Image (spheres, helix red, strand yellow):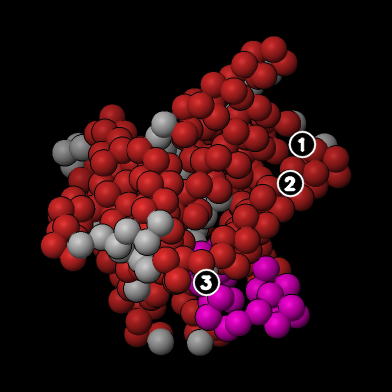
Amino acid sequence: MLKTVFFALLPILVTICLGIFAAHLQAFTEQDSKKFVVLIMDYALPLHVFSGIWATPRKIIIEDMPLALWLVVSMFGCYLIMMLLQTKLLKTPNKTATLRALSIADPSVPFIGSAILPLLFGASISAIDIGISTLIINIILLPLVFTSLVSDTATRQFNLIQRLHNTLKKPLVLSALAGFALALLGWQMPPALESTFTVLGKTAGGIAMFATGIVLYVRKISFNKRIISIVIGKNIIFPCIIWVSMFLLNMPNALQRIVVVTLAIPTATMPTNLAIQYKVNESEMASVQFWSTVLSFASLSIFMLLLS
């Protein structure tokens, strides 16, 4: 198991380091990384998610409904609890609390998950996991985050409606919905079509890691107690709480394994992107992303070993 985890994570480390090295040589800039993100989110990853879900038999998808339920409850519940803890108990400003809560509740499933999950759980289950997580993040979490980051009430209400409308038009969300619809209708994807989607789709994980390396080189990385607490909360405490809850409720071991590993994936790039866009704690969010990714090499390995 340790060998499997090591070789699942090693390509991520190497690819991120290549991105950092390329940015150091000025071969790529932060603007290039943004173009890579567009390639991933609008083209490569939608193809990967769509084909993976469509190729999955309807029976397997129906059996994975508990997976969807646990991921929804875990991510949404974590976000709300962290928001209440930050704003009510710690008196943290609303915008800062929003980004910190999102950093803990939002694992980088579309990026890092697309590189790790297929190696650990297979293409079909990982595609369903990525698709479900994508829908949760884009349809539930991000609209809530957006309302907190916009100050004016009238503008916030208008932008929330607009945000929901725009979310449903995103290629990644549409591909997940379309894949689920076709699979649930029982229209199985012909094997001859598989390469049509995977030629570009399989590049999503590698390009995402390379782009992350570029961003991490450009952004100033810091290290303090607050950042440490957020990273430990994301990588260790949050997955452990869900794991204990599932264990006490006697959930199947296979379900515990994929849910906990998914939640233990390091924080996504979205908090950093939003921090830059709204000029809220940019350095802190970039640092959380960096150290969460670094710590995941140890934390994910430990979770996989314990869950095995």
Q: Is residue 171 visible?
A: yes
The residue singled out by tag 1 in the image is: 92
Between the residue at mark 1 and the residue at mark 3, the CA separation in whole angstroms equals: 41 Å
Judge the density around disc 2: few (<14), some (14-19), many (≥20) Cα neighbours within 10 Å: some
As drawn, 276 above or below 211: above
Q: Residue at x 43, y 42 (%)?
A: 173
The reply to whether the magenta stretch includes residue 65 is no
**Which tag is nearer the camera, tag 1 or tag 2?**
2
Q: Position of residue 166 (x, y in %)?
A: 47, 27
Q: Is residue 226 visible?
A: no
Mostly what secondary structure, the magenta segment? helix
The residue singled out by tag 2 in the image is: 80
- Residue 2: which quarter of the image? bottom left
As drawn, 142 above or below 244: above
Q: Of the residues shown, which amino acid type is indicated by label 1?
A: Thr
Q: Residue at x 41, y 31 (%)?
A: 169
Name the one closer to the observer, 123 or 54: 54
Q: Residue at x 80, y 44 (%)?
A: 84
Q: Which mark is drawn over residue 63?
A: 3
Q: Of the residues shown, which amino acid type is indicated by label 2?
A: Leu
